[in-house]
Amino acid sequence: MTIFDKSLTNDQIMMRDVCRRFVDDVIQPFISQNWQKEWDLTPEGRLPDNILIESEAIGIRTLGVPERFGGISLEPENEVRTFAVISEEIARGDSGLADKLVQNWKVSVLLRELASEEHQERWFGKLIEDPNFLFAHALTEPKGASDRWLGYNAPSAAMDTKAKKVDGGWVINGRKHYISNGYDAGLYIVYANTKPGTGMLEGTSSFILPRGAEGFKITRCNETVGCRYMNNGELEFIDCFVPDENLLCEGTALSKAGVYFRPGKIIQSAKNLGVGQSALEKTAQFVQNYSRGGRLLIKHQIVASRLADMATKVSAVRSLVLQAAYACDMKTSDADALCWMAKVFASEEILKVCQNAMELHGGMGAMLDAGIEKLMRDASIFLHMDATVDISHFKIVKSLWPDTAGTYAGPEESS
């Protein structure tokens, strides 16, 4: 038992161990034996159906879905920490698969808190019924993404995607891009400006939109450098009609989505951590079994020093992630700052861990079939997933010193 185990409940340890066996027995063998599948430019052909089916079998695909709808409810006082523990384990196998599942978890929390009983019954039912059914959260636009979270609440920062009220519903026009699960989700939560001339915190609404709705088109799958087993997509809305009953939240959708955003930062950090843990494990095994210069690699001082540094960084990231997750669960006053800190620290430190893994593997680290360069590619994306590092730094400052922090956005002052 480690110091981290002592901070977990028995249920969390059991769920973690089940996920660990799933990763060791199913995910890692698939990734190593089918490394070419990651580069299949037919997105539908990358990840076989049985992977999500087997994740359903161990009960991790529907976390956050209320038990009355057939899901796996988590204890409220431990929910975010449980998400973090499981996210780390799944990302240790593959961060793309973790991303697929994470979107289901986060949107499930959003629907659980905001959707009508009828919508919950319908869409949670779809999720339970079809092991390959996915949720997506459509917020990011070509105009901007995390920069909109700088606290500049003015019309010029509002969504470009707009929804206009008509008889019986709303008509949406606009585009969304870089949407996780965007290419193959069955249900989307779409954000749009419904009150032009106001700030995004008062004029942004969210809508429940199923795949195949008239006027809604999935235009492409983005081919990313890493996390390629999650199909990132671009969306287009041309006079897309949404009935009144599909309005999830009017006007204050971004504020209400706080139930999603805080846990999202923790889950993102935990996914980073899983990639770093995988890099550490693979490197530790390699340097203890391969010899150069007449002795095991680990017996060379420079190798031992780098390995120690990797282990220290992974341990430090895990400590901050669990601290932030606890603050999130307990809703403490420092939760916002800690969530942003965990996101920044994990993305930067795990990239360094993966760089060390690449270098300690030598030429083998660059080979596609060795699996080390994949970890480096996956880690490189984390710097801008769920907010860029620079924007996150601003958010940390604004969380800690709200009265004196800068605005960071808006019209330049006239001279």
Image (cartoon, rainbow, N blue to C red):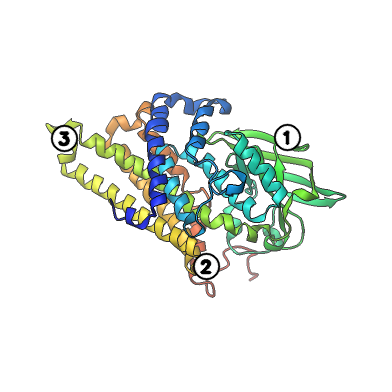
Q: Can you tell which quarter of the image residue 202 is in?
A: bottom right
User: Marks 1 and 2: CB-CB under 8 Å?
Assistant: no
Against 249, is 103 above or below? above
Q: Give the residue at mark 3.
A: 296
Q: Nearer the viewer, residue 289 or 400?
A: 289
Q: Give the residue at mark 2.
A: 398
Question: Residue, x 24% and y 48% (percent of image)?
Answer: 308
Q: Is residue 353 visible?
A: yes
- Could you tell me residue 52's position as x and y percent? 52, 33
Number of residues whose C-alpha sits closer than 10 Å to that of mark 3, classed few (under 14), some (14–19) or many (20 or more): some
Question: Residue, x 51% and y 28% (percent of image)?
Answer: 50
Query: Hey, which residue is sitting farthest right in the picture?
Result: 167
- Could you tell me residue 141's position as x and y percent? 65, 47
Against 19, is 396 above or below? below
**Looking at the picture, which amino acid does disc 2 mark?**
Lys
Q: Earlier in the sequence, mark 3 or mark 1?
A: 1
Against 79, is 286 above or below? above
Secondary structure found at label 1: loop
Q: CA distance from mark 1 to mark 2?
A: 41 Å
Q: CA distance from mark 3 to mark 2?
A: 49 Å
Q: Nearer the viewer, residue 244 or 388?
A: 244
Question: Residue, x 43% and y 24% (percent of image)?
Answer: 34
Query: Hey, which residue is sitting farthest front in the picture?
Result: 68
The label nearer to you, 3 versus 1, is 1
Query: If the image is split into quadrants, where does the C terminus sit?
Result: bottom right
Secondary structure found at label 2: helix
